[in-house]
Image: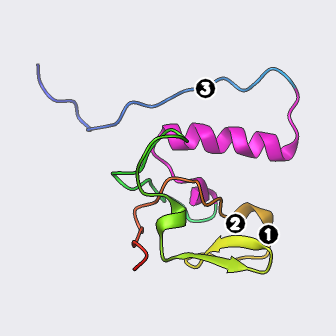
């Protein structure tokens, strides 16, 4: 069997939920689908930001997380990534998220 024109990872396609979701729940759903497809949740503000190769795709799995990264910082009451800090909710960081390709372990 010959290799395809492009080497691609399988893509997870998820139908939008039938019930009406709040903006926050819809954003959470989109982030979960993105994680399943190898995209970091902050790829909405840092285009093309992919998951670290060792990062888990499931919430309870082992692997590097944003909480383990030296870029994770606190800005007021919110966790942020110092690679992208803004005053809006879309850039808030959840420490349980899987690490991205820019992951640097805390010393």
10 over 65 or under it: above or below = above
Position of the N terminus, as image quadrant, is top left
Residue plotted at (42% across, 68% down): 102
SS type, badge 3: loop
Q: Which residue is mark 2?
A: 91
42 over 103 or under it: above or below = above
What is the crowding at mark 2: few (fewer than 14 residues within 10 Å), some, or many (at least 20)?
Answer: many
Residue 85 in sight = no
What whole-number distance in Å separates the C-alpha atoms at marks 2 and 1?
6 Å
What is the crowding at mark 3: few (fewer than 14 residues within 10 Å), some, or many (at least 20)?
Answer: few
Q: Residue furthest left?
A: 1
Residue plotted at (58% across, 79% down): 82
What whole-number distance in Å separates the C-alpha atoms at marks 2 and 3?
24 Å
Task: Indicate the quadrant where residue 16 lies.
Answer: top right
**Magenta stretch, overall SS:** helix
The type of colouring in the image is rainbow
Magenta span contains residue 12: no
Residue 38 in sight = yes
Position of the C terminus, as image quadrant, is bottom left
Magenta region: 20-44
Q: Which residue is mark 3?
A: 14
């Amino acid at each position: 069997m010959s290799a395809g024109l492009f080497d691609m990872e399988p893509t997870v396609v998820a139908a939008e939920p039938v019930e009406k979701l709040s903006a926050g729940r819809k954003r959470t759903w989109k982030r979960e689908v993105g994680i399943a497809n190898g995209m970091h949740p902050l790829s909405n503000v840092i285009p093309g930001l992919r998951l670290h190769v060792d990062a888990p795709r499931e919430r309870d799995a082992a692997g590097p997380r944003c909480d383990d990264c030296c870029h994770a910082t606190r800005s007021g009451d919110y966790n942020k990534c110092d690679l992208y800090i803004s005053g809006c909710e879309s850039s808030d960081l959840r420490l349980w998220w899987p690490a991205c390709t820019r992951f640097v372990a805390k010393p």
